[in-house]
Amino acid sequence: MADEFPEIPKWISFTKTWHTKPYPFISPERPELSAASKNVVVAGGGTGIGKATAIAFAQAGAASVSILGRRANRLEEAAQEIRAAGPKTTVITEGADMSQRAEAVAALKNIANKVGKVHVFMWCAGILPRVAPVLGYDEEEFRRSFELMTLSAFNAIQAVLPVATPDAKIINVSSGIAHINPMPGVFTYAMYKLAVVKMFDYLAAENPKLHIVNTQPGVIKTEINADTDVEGQDEIELPASFHVWLASPEAEFLKSKYVWVNWDAEELVSRKDEIKNSMLFRILLEGMPM
């Protein structure tokens, strides 16, 4: 029986326009968003948003797109789609359980040995723990899911930085659950998503040359929520295209920010000075600028 996921609230948009599908300004085929000469790595690239993002970077002409995951068959299936989208893009698959440091490090080293330094790293891996209230939640399930995902992100950071360029673009595909009002029953998902955001925030503060952004990728029906009653609200190509735009020079002003892919990118650009030089799009205590 599907888990009873809590009702998804009505979203409030920062921009006047709210998108549920891709649009021309964030098209991977826009010359301004070209990923030519860039080596892109997508952790969790065998399925879902990760796969769609890998395909979009191939469409943008990336020099190479490497995908990481635990299931070799899913990686190879995804690789075929990525190659079809970008015939000139080198596509690499690396089987790795990112919760195991040795596997994570070996996978990133193998990629770097083949294509060189990493310019763009996408953290798209994730699970949806059992939906249930805080009180009475199974301790082993809590420990397993929380440790699995926070440790996997931690290992990914340790593995990718030694083989990345000093100014690499690192995008953490998070979830709005990390900062919206509580939705009873999904506290474990919210906790690990928020913990990982904070980890990437610290990474950004400690490595100011890196360009790190956290995203809310929309509400999309994928394998992660297949056993729930969640209904998709957005097309999977929306976050994929938006992530390509985020890695482009046009989105430099969003460094160290948290942004929703549904917000209109062109309108964000028109307000870039306001966004860049303020506490907007940061997880903080409202009214306390610190």
Image (tube, grey):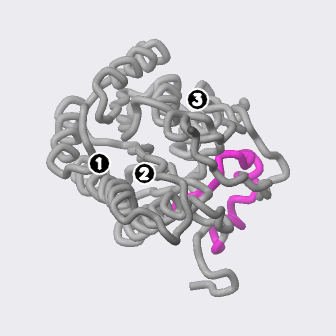
Between disc 2 and disc 1, the foreground one is 2
Residue at 41 percent across and 47 percent down: it is 123
Image quarter (top left, top right, bottom left or bottom right) of the C terminus: bottom right
The residue that appears at 74% across and 37% down in the rendered structure is 20
Q: Position of residue 273 (x, y in %)?
A: 69, 64
Distance of label 3 from label 1 (alpha carbons): 23 Å
What kind of residue is marked 3? Pro
Which segment did they paint magenta?
A: 253-279
Which is more toward the observer, 243 or 183? 183
Q: Is residue 285 above or below residue 206?
A: below
Q: What is the number of the mark on residue 28? A: 3
State the mark number for residue 70.
none
> Which is more N-terminal, label 2 or label 3?
3
Q: Secondary structure at mark 2?
A: strand
Q: Which residue is mark 1?
A: 164
Quadrant position of residue 278: bottom right
Q: Dots 2 and 1: beta carbons under 8 Å? A: yes
Residue 132 sits in quarter = bottom right
Q: Secondary structure at mark 1?
A: strand
User: Which amino acid is tagged 1?
Assistant: Ala
Q: Position of residue 183 (x, y in %)?
A: 65, 62
The reply, left or right, for residue 122 in relation to residue 71 is: right
Q: Looking at numbered disc 2 in the image, what kind of residue is underneath it?
A: Ile
| Residue 258 included in the magenta stretch of the image | yes
* Category of crowding for the residue at label 1, using alpha-carbon neighbours closer than 10 angstroms: few (below 14), some (14–19), many (at least 20): many
The residue located at (56%, 59%) in the rendering is: 186
Determine which of the numbered discs, if any, sits on residue 170 in the image.
Answer: 2
| 139 in relation to 40, above or below | below
Q: Is residue 277 left or right of residue 46?
A: right
